[in-house]
Amino acid sequence: MDMKQIRRDFPATQDKVFLNAAGLSIPPVSAIRAIESFLESSLLRPHPSTPLSSTAQYHESLEQGKEKTRQEVAALLKCSPREIAIVESTTHGLNLAVTAIPFKEGDNVVLCDLEFMQVAIPFVHLKQTMGLEIRVVEHTEGTVSVDQFAEAMDSHTRAICVSSVQWVHGFRVDLAGLSELARQYGVYLIVDGVQQVGAIDLDVSQLAIDFLACGGHKWLNSPFGAGFLYVWEENLLQVEPHTRGYLTAQEPEQGWGGYFASPSATPIVDYRYVSDARKFETGGTSNYPGVIGLAASLAYINRLGIKNIQAHIFKLTNYLVEGLRKRKATILSPLGEECRSGIITFRLFDDPHLDAQLEQRLLADRIYVATRYTSHVGGTRVSVHFFNNDDDIDSLLQAIDHNLKVMRKE
């Protein structure tokens, strides 16, 4: 990878050390230019060049922008575009997945205690409204195993829901093992992929994942309110969303432009709907600027190659871990290649309040990291992406040295 060019393509790296892709990441120039081009077109609204009305033609062109995004996601995940729905966020995608599953009284779902709250919220809501049982796998020193999930399951288990990479310290779960477990029990596997996709290779063609939700605002470098929901092809005829929109209905023979201009058109008909993952979309006017920005960011990642990105991230995180160990830091993140990610979380103090104080001092030095905890796991979280380089790591380590000296004197 051409790091000089990548740094130019991410201007936000020029005046700060940005090590927070796990929070709200920064976009490349190409994403901003794509959105600007869209806004310019919206401002001027070129004259139609087809028999369609100007409105129908323009709306059709907007929907084509979603198709570009769908293609880029499919290329990244190694799946069919038919399996990709364009959604607003990870939250949106998770809720679509959970509400599509026909839970019934007596069912249970298995989660672990390392999750970001949004993974649990849809199930907590079902617990409150229809009595769904939530079984919690408790972590062991920051990790959870397939065997632990298996021990929590029984004949009433309906689903497993898990983040492929845990948000606080970057533990990457054994998705292959969990997908085998889910098939063994005949349950749904729902995955929050937002802390993995775009940083660490995820080939869904080699796994049996029923749903995978991912917002664009983290490792996909597209903080514009758009993401995707992957729906395994085998589920497309078995699960149905609870909402419908006209753009998820099958297009009339004369096309939407012809339908809108037809005097005999009536709203009360037996609609037929698309059979691919698009049926999970709102079916109305979408966040088109966000979708276009996401497509450009995805295209950038696909050009670099996810395996190249992963190798770069592992190289930099190795360098970071080496420097932290020299400073006697406690590394919370698992470092085995099979369970690591782009997140390195560490602690330099026994007092969590001092971790938070260190974060504030680093932010004042324009070094962007975060302090994150859940279930007593956490510390200072550093998230390293492909736009980072050795100089960023050196700047962080030097700032830690300086601030530790100051804090020890105070």
Image (cartoon, helix red, strand yellow):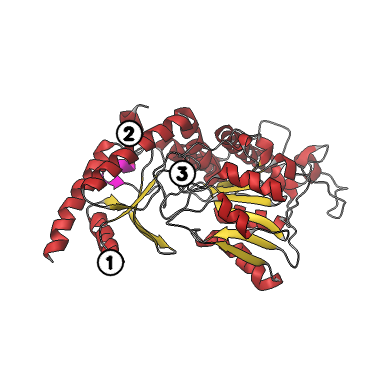
On residue 8, the disc is: 2
Q: Quadrant of residue 107?
A: bottom right
Residue 315 position in % (x across, y down): 34, 35
* Mark 3 and mark 1: Cα distance apart in space: 27 Å
User: Is 16 one of the magenta-colored residues?
Assistant: yes
Give whichever of discs 3 and 2 has the lower sequence position: 2
* 10 Å crowding of disc 1: few (<14), some (14-19), many (20+): few
Boundaries of the magenta span: 12-18
Amino acid on which disc 3 is placed: Cys
Closer to the camera in the image, 249 or 364: 364
The local secondary structure at tag 1 comes to: loop
The residue nearer to you, when weighing 164 against 129, is 164
Q: Which residue is mark 1?
A: 351
Q: Is residue 229 visible?
A: no
- Residue that extends furthest to the left in the rendered view of this protein: 409
Marks 1, 2: nearer the viewer: 1
Q: Residues within 10 Å of mark 3 (few under 14, many from 20)?
A: some
Q: Position of residue 87 (x, y in %)?
A: 60, 49
Residue visible at 61% across and 63% down in the picture:
122
Residue type, label 2? Arg
- Left or right of 69, for residue 270: right
Residue 106 higher or lower than 89, as above or below: below
Q: Nearer the viewer, residue 134 or 405?
A: 134
Q: Residue at x 22, y 41 (%)?
A: 394
Q: Which residue is mark 3?
A: 339
Q: SS at mark 2?
A: helix
Please give left or right for residue 52 compared with residue 368 in the image: right
Mark 1 belongs to which amino acid?
Asp
